[in-house]
Amino acid sequence: MEAVVVYASQFGNTRHIAEAIARGLGQGARAVEAGSFSTAELGPGSLLVVGSPIVGWKPLEGLGAWLDGLAPGALDGVRAAAFDTRVKLFIHGDAAKKIEHALEKAGATRAAEPSWYYVKGQEGPLLDGELDRAEAWGRELAAA
């Protein structure tokens, strides 16, 4: 199974989470910035994990543009999961669900419920334990 974690990151926290998820997914999995990845690289049965920080209640602009560029059917046969990084507040938005919706609109099948990871303040760093949690989620995705 090919596994790719595509991300956009503003201050590096989402990149660190993406890399931890890729480690959890196992050998051959990789984390790639959205602007450097084409879905043409994916085949049926591939796993695509996509993540972004929440910015203005939605994914980071660069990832939003990448998602908007996905044609209907571009992800047919691909399993997908979404995540976001966020500040731990009562009200914070939900980029992961917006990402998931865009992936499903492009034909992907949900591999797992969206996940989220917390940062301390707008720029971070990540809260203690979040990298371990992300790597564990990657292992769960690989086993599913």
Image: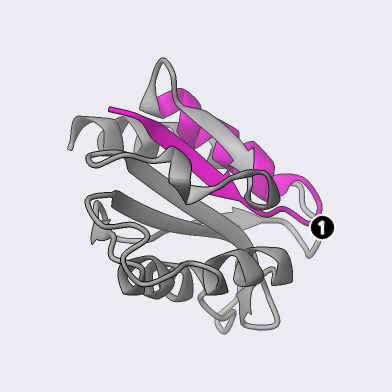
Tell me: residue 22, above or below residue 124: above
- The residue drawn where x is 69% and y is 52% is 35
Tell me: residue 143, above or below residue 7: above
Q: Which residues are magenta?
A: 1-24
- Give 125 or 70, whichever is nearer the viewer: 70
**Looking at the image, can residue 30 be seen?**
yes
Task: Please identify the quarter of the rendering in which residue 60 is found.
Answer: bottom right
- The residue drawn where x is 43% and y is 48% is 49
Q: Which quadrant of the rendered structure holds the C terminus? A: top left
Please give the residue where the numbered disc 1 appears in the rendered image.
123
Query: Does the stretch in magenta take in 62?
Result: no
Outermost residue on the left side: it is 144
Label tally = 1
**What amino acid is at disc 1?**
Glu
Mark 1 lies on a secondary structure that is: loop
Outermost residue on the top side: it is 27
Residue 78: image location, x then y, percent: 28, 49
Instruction: Answer few, some or many: residues within 10 Å of disc 1's Cα (few below 14, many 20 plus, some between 14 and 19).
Output: few
Tell me: residue 8, above or below residue 129: below
Q: Which quadrant of the rendered structure holds the N terminus? A: top left
Residue 48: image location, x then y, percent: 39, 46
**Looking at the image, can residue 127 be seen?**
no
- The residue drawn where x is 24% and y is 51% is 111
